[in-house]
Amino acid sequence: MKTTKHVSQILIAPAPHLVGDGFRVQSVLPGGTRSLNNKISPFILMDYGAPSYFPPTNKPRGVDQHPHKGFETVTVVYQGELEHRDSTGSQGKLAPGDVQWMTAAAGIVHEEKHETEFSKRGGKVEMAQLWVNLPKAYKNNKPGYQNLTKAEIPVIDLGEGSFVRVIAGEFNGTKGAAKTFSPVNVLDVQLKKGDKLDVTFPQHFNTAVVMMRGEADFNGNAAKGVETVLFEHDGTDITVTALEDTAMLILSGEPIDEPIFAYGPFVMNTEDEIKEAINDYNAGKMGFLN
């Protein structure tokens, strides 16, 4: 029997800010408070960078080398081209439609920049970055990457230009491209005005919809870009009706019932583990970039 998952809260994103010199983003899913952590776990936070023009330059813009430990970052590129490299020796490029799922786990140092040739041409960059927590059992795993090209991500065509890309989890029997350490659904959705989408998640899952563009109705509550809709645990089903052409990320996952202690780029379970992470980074145990 279908039961409605009602809206509990709509978050309004603050003004854009620069991360490094290459990403103009808004904190659409802010982390850091215990009450919100309980509503969005296993997700930690998300930034969305609406389309922003960057003029040509010979020095790629972006974020210089920095560490991460204890969680995963998911970078989705909509416009522009990015490149990355890290302390494991990995490097790669991201084109529109590509997703990078990075598992920081035991610790990694990396940098994220606009791709070199794209930088020389200049152009618009649109992207999103989501942080996903790791259960304690996996926080000290070896770091790694899942570089998911646009072609590798399953697309469910809803007709008339509407579609669902299954980045992680499952939608209507189609499994996502990414492998995850806990049950997580990440759906990249575009709906044309008037189209509807029904999604179902377990009642106990935390669920959020990040509106990037347009306006949509969620079980009787309207939200627009750049607002984030949080849901109660009173049902399983959400009906999305596009009031305008829309783009959104639908996030749903099983809460990780463990303590969270976060400090900057480190997300662990205790203060002592944070201190250890800082010491490991300062001692070079997370590696270096040449």
Image (cartoon, grey):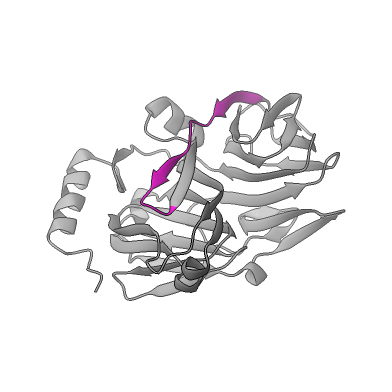
Percent position of residue 17, x then y: 43, 40
- Please state which of residues 223 and 164 is positioned toward the viewer in this rendering: 223
The number of numbered badges drawn on the structure is: 0
Percent position of residue 281, x then y: 19, 57
Percent position of residue 98, x then y: 58, 65
Q: Is residue 87 left or right of residue 61?
A: left
Residue 262 placement: quadrant: top left
Q: Vertical placement of 284 versus 234: above or below?
A: below
Q: Vertical placement of 210 versus 163: above or below?
A: above
Q: Vertical placement of 232 versus 98: above or below?
A: above
Q: Which residue is at 73% across, 49% downward? A: 190
Q: Which residue is at 29% across, 42% downward? A: 269
- Please state which of residues 220 and 268 is positioned toward the viewer in this rendering: 220
Q: Which part of the image, by quadrant, shows the N terminus?
A: top right
Q: Which residue is at 21% across, 46% downward? A: 273
Q: Which part of the image, by quadrant, shows the C terminus?
A: bottom left
Residue 195 placement: quadrant: top right
